[in-house]
Structure formats: structure tokens, C-alpha cells
Image (cartoon, rainbow, N blue to C red):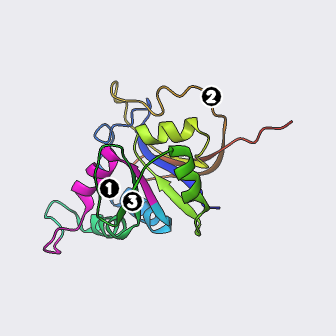
Amino acid sequence: MRALRYSINITLDGCCHHEAGIPPDEESMSYWTAEMERADALLFGRVTYEMMESAWRRPADGAWPDWMDEWDIPFAEAIDRAEKHVVSSTLSGVDWNAELVRGDLGEAVRLLKQEPGERLWVGGVTLPLALAGLGLIDEYELLVQPVVAGRGPTLLAGLRERIRLELVDRREFRSGTVAMRYRPARHDA
């Protein structure tokens, strides 16, 4: 069964808005590129899908935009070619190597997890909250930025039940960012 990993950048105070942290540097983009390349497929809600597509989809002329640094391009290429599943009740169709996920969210994600492979990757805010509430996230990967936002949406705000986690990996970046990976703690009887 494929593990579902939730990965996101957050600030020290838990803000998960994509503009609240530190702009990505070469080291963090290299990290995210490796994560994209290890994922069998990506799972997005509509908002995250549209945001990622507007930033990282290869333009029709094949040339990456001028705003990209050289070290952004491997990430762009990895996410551009990745298989994507988009959870949405409002979109009538998707492309960019994507298919719509409809119906019961829990059942649909359980079926995706049963497909061959090692890992599904989910990003965003709203969809991961629903998946965490259903107990479907197998790993939480947080890149904690050395910034206090003081405002904005916070990670998994509104979760109904507490989820105990165990740290399974930690890595420090030169920028002061710390990548931490957790798994839900096992319940002992």
C-alpha cells in the first residue's frame, strides 16, 4: 500500500500561507525536487492544483519563464511531469497530467493508496485537513521556516481530534529552515 505524505512549508507560528515564509532558496528547492521525484503521484485540492499549475506548468512554447532561477527548473520539470489527482466538486475537468477525484473522499483516497507504488504526496491546506480527520495521512513533512508570520491560516486549523506524532527524520538547512518528518504514533493497548 502506498503511504500518503502531507508536505508543506510553515512558519514558526504555524502559518501555512505560501507567501508567509521565506522565498525558496537553492537548498530548499533541491529538497522539494527530490520529494517530487520520489512521489508516485500528487494529490491536490482545487485551489492548490490551480496555484501549482499557474506557477509550475511548462508553457506551451516549452521555455520556462524568466522569473525562474536555474535551480527552480528541476523542481518545475518534476512537478510538471508528475501524475496528479485533483479533488474538486466544482471543476468540470483537469489536464496537466491530472484526473479528477470525485465521490466519497475517504474511499477515493483509500483506492489511490492501494494502487502500486511507494508514495502519494499531498500539499495544500483544506484537503490535508480533511484527510487528517479521516486518519488517511501516513506521514507529515513540515519545512519550518525561521519566520513568525503573526497572521494567516495555520496548519490543520479546525482538526477535531488530536493526532499524536512521532519524529522519524529531521534535517537542518543553511537558511535556518528545519525539515521534520513525523508519523502518527502507534496506539499501545
For label 2, the residue is: 162
| Count of numbered tags | 3
**Which mark identifies residue 27?**
3
In the displayed structure, would residue 179 be above or below residue 80? above
At x 44%, y 33%, the residue is: 12
Question: Which amino acid type is marked by label 2?
Answer: Arg
Give the Cα distance between marks 3 and 1: 6 Å
Q: Secondary structure at mark 1?
A: loop
Q: Which numbered disc flags the more N-terminal residue, 3 or 2? A: 3
Give the Cα distance between marks 3 and 2: 32 Å
Quarter location, residue 42: bottom left
* Badge 3 density bin: few <14, some 14–19, many ≥20, Cα 10 Å: some
159 left or right, relative to 102:
right
**Which mark identifies residue 25?**
1
Q: Are marks 3 and 2 in contact (CB under 8 Å)?
A: no
Q: Position of residue 91 (x, y in %)?
A: 29, 48
Kindly give the residue lying farthest to the right in the view shown.
189
**Which mark identifies residue 102?**
none
Viewer-nearest of labels 1 and 2?
2
Q: Position of residue 86 (x, y in %)?
A: 38, 53
